[in-house]
Amino acid sequence: MSDTRIDAEPGTVYLVGSGPGDPDLLTVKAKRLLEECDVVLHDKLPGPEIIDRLPEDRREDVGKRAGGERTPQSEINERLVELAREGKSVVRLKGGDSFVFGRGGEEAEYLAAHEVPFEVVPAVTSAIAAPAVAGIPVTHRDHASSVSFVTGHEDPTKAESAVDWDALAATGGTIVVLMGVGRLPDYTTALLEAGMAPETPVALVERGTWPGQQVATGTLETIVEARDEAGIEPPAVTVIGDVAGTRESVVEFLQNDAGATDDGADGGT
Ligand code: SAH
């Protein structure tokens, strides 16, 4: 590689996605900025392999506060502005891509409103990468011509739920749910009630590309049991749709998840 440097600018904030967690999946730009910047603000989602390599004297964990609760976004926003105004070059490092359920948009708006120069450094989102390393393409010419990325964080039975599960069921495309381990029973039920076939394949990919990556597969009807059997915990993505079934035909030769435990109550092996 060339030795061209990016030269992280003083007084500038870089909204950088880390990719799903494997340090080799950082972009070249992210890696250089992490090396050059004065300070990195991060939470836990970039994963242990990336976080542990950040120099301790140049990083701030803004994921959780001392009491264990989440740092309010307003505090993070203020800290970004404060550091930039001190003349620091600041990397705000988020797991996956900062603009996919990463609050990067809110941070960009805040920085702009406070006239702080910033740059967005796009990255590999876990919404695509976690399925991929489990052998699941989010689109496939024979199985899905669209894909939707949705949050599983909300209660689907609430009338004001921002996610329209009925409409998603009707697309016939792939549905990738982030932050959706806990509410898996709620939205699988919502999708079944919306008329999706009970045998629709579903896969859960936990800690995609991290050490300890785990995959559980099943159907809309069986995936909750598979989740519990495999002990799937966040962070994990849920892939719903026929593409999830194609994993079976490639997994034997797939080197990405050699260490993954596999396949809960899907009736097959
Ligand atoms: N900006 C992130 C998403 C943040 S929301 C991105 O683009 O990937 C947090 C959710 O991301 C988690 O609940 C989980 O659903 C997903 N996630 C992030 N990293 C993951 C990984 N390595 N494997 C599986 N899911 C992951």
Image (tube, helix red, strand yellow):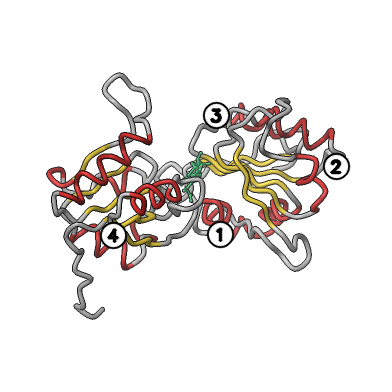
In this rendering, which labeled residue sits more in front, label 1 or label 2? 2
Side of 32 relative to 193 (left or right): left
* Distance CA(mark 2)–CA(mark 3): 25 Å
Q: Which mark is residue 254?
A: 1
Residue at the location (63% across, 60% down)?
Answer: 137
In this rendering, which labeled residue sits more in front, label 1 or label 4? 4
Which of pointers 4 and 2 lies earlier in the amino acid sequence? 4
Residue placed under numbered mark 4 in the picture = 117
Q: Which mark is residue 197?
A: 2
* Distance CA(mark 1)–CA(mark 4): 43 Å
Q: Which mark is residue 231?
A: 3
Residue at the location (62% across, 49% down)?
Answer: 149
In this rendering, which labeled residue sits more in front, label 4 or label 2? 4
* Distance CA(mark 4)–CA(mark 2): 49 Å
* Distance CA(mark 1)–CA(mark 2): 28 Å
Amino acid bearing label 3? Gly
Amino acid bearing label 4? Pro
Whether the residues at callouts 2 and 3 have beta carbons within 8 Å, the answer is no
Q: Secondary structure at mark 3?
A: loop
Side of 200 relative to 25 (left or right): right
